[in-house]
Image (cartoon, rainbow, N blue to C red):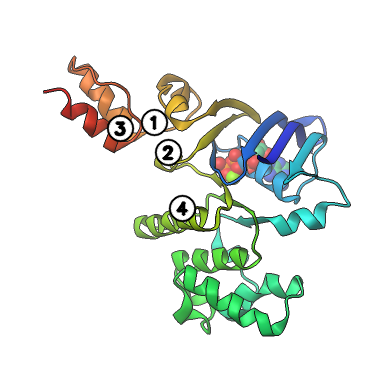
């Protein structure tokens, strides 16, 4: 089932200068879809269009069967959660507890039910011990965890992560990436992850590549990511396994292209 659909969407910040040009995409319910592209290609703009923070100029946006329109926007906002790049801009409350609760208060959840919900998601993201702490004093990774708990508490069926791990150190990155994967598996949430991390793309179900506000490539990572020359021409990275395979090729050793390391090692083992 299609969960998010864009049909010929156009958007401009300045009149006559579209930054999203006839973009069509379709994201399956429960899938983990990555969206990649060079700086300024329009990824965050697409995220904001999907969440309803920006209004399209032309085309159609359909979220969970609902057409993005004035009358549906409140319903749609309840379905879609977002986690942005900079965790510092996502805090409003004076404690972690307040922050996770913030969206819930807005959606008029009963006070009596609130604590149970907060505890559950604080637990899920491993932040139970920090509930009474001030969000400002947390590390970047911890802040992102709290932001994610706040989004999960609203029980969205779609979450858009816009470079949610890019400010974190390798350990923070690993942990949040794992957390996103767990959320996806356990809650069957449709995940749209905007990322510059090509290894994350390797593990996703589907990838869209943006270039200058247009979809340049789309498909399963195993089909898209082996097109090395095209990726490089779009200012993008190539999976590590492909780089290794190409180094072997230079030594005249032919190995079938594999986008993940496990597959590559299997191929190498068959060489003997
Ligand atoms: N508020 C704004 N006003 C005017 N132009 C903007 C605004 N936000 C973004 N743009 C322009 O729109 C284009 C797309 O920007 P967008 O932020 O969607 O890119 P992106 O793919 O998310 O890039 P990055 O990888 O750097 O995050 C860019 O050319 C950018 O300069
Ligand atoms: Mg961006």
Mark 1 and mark 2 residues within 8 Å of each other at the beta carbon: yes
Task: Identify which residue, 123 or 250, lies in the foreground.
Answer: 123
Mark 2 and mark 4 residues within 8 Å of each other at the beta carbon: no
Quick check: can you spot residue 42? no
For disc 2, the marked residue is: 198
Q: Quadrant of the C terminus?
A: top left
For disc 3, the marked residue is: 241
Task: Identify which residue, 209 or 233, lies in the foreground.
Answer: 209
Mark with earlier residue (1, 2): 2
For disc 4, the marked residue is: 181
Location of residue 54 in the rendering, given as x and y in whole percent from the top left corner: 76, 47
Q: Secondary structure at mark 3?
A: helix
Closer to the observer: label 1 or label 4? 4
Q: Quadrant of ligand 2?
A: top right
Q: Secondary structure at mark 2?
A: helix
Quick check: can you spot residue 134? yes
Instruction: Specify the label residue 71 is tagged with.
Output: none
């Amino acid at each position: 089932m299609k969960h998010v659909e864009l049909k010929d969407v156009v958007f401009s910040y300045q009149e006559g200068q579209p930054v999203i040009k006839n973009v069509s995409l379709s994201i399956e319910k429960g899938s983990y879809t990555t969206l990649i592209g060079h700086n300024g290609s329009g990824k965050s703009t697409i995220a904001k269009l999907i969440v309803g923070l920006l209004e399209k100029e032309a085309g159609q946006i359909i979220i969970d069967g609902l057409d993005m329109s004035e009358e549906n926007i409140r319903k749609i906002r309840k379905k879609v959660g977002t986690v942005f790049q900079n965790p510092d801009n996502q805090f409003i409350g004076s404690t972690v507890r307040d922050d996770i609760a913030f969206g819930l208060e807005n959606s008029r959840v009963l006070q009596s039910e609130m604590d149970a919900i907060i505890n559950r998601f604080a637990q899920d993201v491993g932040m139970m011990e920090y509930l009474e702490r001030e969000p400002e004093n947390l590390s970047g990774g911890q802040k992102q965890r709290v932001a994610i708990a706040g989004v999960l508490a609203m029980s969205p069926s779609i979450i858009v992560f816009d470079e949610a791990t890019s400010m974190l150190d390798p350990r923070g990155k690993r942990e949040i990436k794992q957390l996103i994967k767990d959320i996806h598996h356990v809650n069957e949430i449709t995940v749209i992850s905007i990322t510059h991390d090509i290894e994350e793309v390797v593990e996703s179900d589907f990838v869209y590549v943006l270039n200058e506000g247009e979809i340049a490539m789309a498909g399963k990572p195993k089909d898209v990511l082996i097109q090395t020359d095209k990726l490089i021409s779009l200012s993008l990275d190539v999976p590590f396994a492909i780089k290794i395979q190409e180094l072997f090729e230079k030594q005249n050793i032919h190995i079938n292209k594999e986008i993940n390391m496990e597959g590559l090692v299997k191929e190498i083992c068959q060489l003997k």
